[in-house]
Image (cartoon, rainbow, N blue to C red):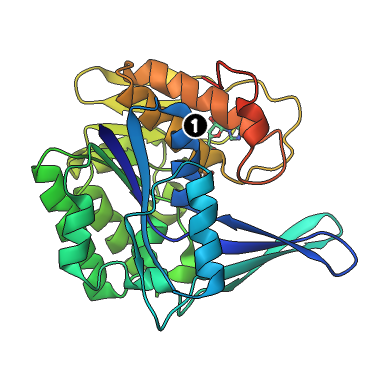
């Protein structure tokens, strides 16, 4: 059995459904990636989500949802004195805005018990995390977390890092830069977005972004540019560019990057060349942004899937 493990925070999502009613869902960047990976990887793969939840009813519901979606939750730690984080999507004149209640969420305890963390990382072929996973951890725990990933990598796991920037979760731009570099240093695969890298590091072109992560030890860097070319670099095959899919109407870009990451990693896991895995990932992300919401099950209704 081969295994894919995503680590981070899955939250309760409340989205406005009219008349003061809210629809409850569960989402979070790395969880979204796990959800897409589950649909793209063969049944011989186990897809697990590693995080912490409470022991209350909503935590039970979150884990039951994950299991129903085919995601293994034996890598979830339950904490009696915490619960899961929550965010609410409000709609005002068609514009979405987000409010968060996550500062005390159970997921922040992800790296407090290193024996448990080392245990769930053991024997994984592919491990995925993001800068949000790092941002929610206290500074010391961030270092412990990356140390545990480095040990898993030394044992042979392929570690992938999505640089998803959320400035509000970091103390300062410098803390965010340091966090990104720490995450990248423990990773084989880095998935940055060029606009964020320009803002934070002043990169003039995507190749500058590639160069920085290559220098930190990555073997593969895929620089996303929304509706622009993907700039791909891999240690053995060098640079490549993949043009975007044509999208007639962008409906909702939520989870574009999360689904892209799942598409790329699943393609690589299936043994595809990086450029082919990237093409499949872009086809998937292009379909995701033509529907509302982070998780789009309709894409997988026609067998053959998205890639
Ligand atoms: P992130 O959400 O991580 O910032 P991007 O916005 O760059 O990432 O989007 C991730 C991927 O989604 C892109 O690499 C591309 O494949 C696809 N994508 C996003 N926006 C568009 C678009 N307007 N047209 C076609 N593909 C898009």
Q: Quadrant of residue 215?
A: top left
117 sits left or right of 75 in the view = left
Q: Which residue of the protein is positioned furthest toward the right in this rendering?
A: 19
Residue at 67 percent across and 31 percent down: it is 298
Q: Position of residue 71 (x, y in %)?
A: 44, 45
Q: Quadrant of ligand 1?
A: top right
The residue carrying mark 1 has its beta carbon less than 8 Å from ligand 1: no
Question: Mark 1 = which residue?
Answer: 39
Describe the element under mark 1 as helix, strand or loop. Answer: helix
Q: Is residue 211 above or below residue 93?
A: above
Q: Is residue 229 visible?
A: no
Q: Position of residue 297 (x, y in %)?
A: 63, 35
Residue at 90 percent across and 66 percent down: it is 19
Q: Position of residue 305 (x, y in %)?
A: 56, 21
Graded by Cα atoms within 10 Å as few (under 14), some (14 to 19) or many (20 or more), the crowding at tag 1 reads many
Q: Quadrant of residue 147?
A: bottom left
Residue at 21 percent across and 51 percent down: it is 121
Q: Which residue of the protein is positioned furthest toward the bottom in this rendering?
A: 81
> Looking at the rendering, in which quadrant would you find the N terminus?
top left
97 sits left or right of 307 in the view = right
Q: Position of residue 124 (x, y in %)?
A: 22, 42
Number of callouts: 1
Q: Is residue 281 visible?
A: yes
Residue at 49 percent across and 31 percent down: it is 39
Q: Is residue 272 above or below residue 139?
A: above
């Amino acid at each position: 059995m081969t295994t894919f493990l995503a680590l981070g925070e899955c939250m309760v999502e409340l989205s406005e459904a009219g008349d003061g009613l809210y629809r409850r869902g569960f989402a979070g960047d790395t969880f979204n990636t796990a959800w897409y990976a589950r649909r793209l990887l063969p049944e011989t793969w186990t897809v697990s989500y590693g995080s912490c939840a409470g022991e209350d009813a909503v935590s039970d519901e979150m884990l039951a949802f994950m299991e129903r979606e085919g995601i293994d939750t034996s890598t979830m730690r339950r904490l009696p004195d915490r619960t899961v984080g929550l965010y609410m999507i409000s709609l005002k004149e068609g514009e979405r805005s987000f409010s968060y209640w996550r500062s005390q969420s159970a997921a922040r305890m992800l790296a407090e018990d290193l024996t448990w963390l080392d245990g769930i990382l053991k024997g994984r072929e592919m491990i995925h995390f993001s800068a949000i996973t790092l941002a929610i951890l206290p500074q010391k725990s961030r270092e412990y977390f990356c140390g545990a990933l480095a040990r898993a990598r030394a044992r042979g796991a392929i570690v992938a890092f999505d640089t998803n920037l959320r400035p509000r979760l970091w103390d300062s731009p410098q803390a965010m830069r340091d966090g990104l570099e720490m995450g990248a240093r423990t990773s084989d695969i880095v998935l940055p977005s060029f606009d964020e890298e320009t803002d934070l590091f002043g990169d003039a072109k995507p190749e500058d972004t590639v160069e920085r992560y290559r220098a930190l030890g990555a073997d593969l860097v895929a620089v996303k540019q929304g509706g622009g070319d993907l700039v791909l670099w891999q240690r053995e095959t060098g640079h490549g560019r993949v043009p975007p899919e044509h999208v007639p109407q962008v409906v909702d870009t939520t989870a574009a990057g999360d689904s892209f990451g799942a598409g790329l990693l699943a393609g690589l896991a299936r043994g595809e060349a990086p450029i082919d895995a990237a093409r499949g990932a872009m086809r998937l992300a292009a379909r995701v942004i033509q529907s509302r919401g982070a998780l789009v099950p309709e894409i997988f209704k026609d067998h053959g899937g998205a890639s």
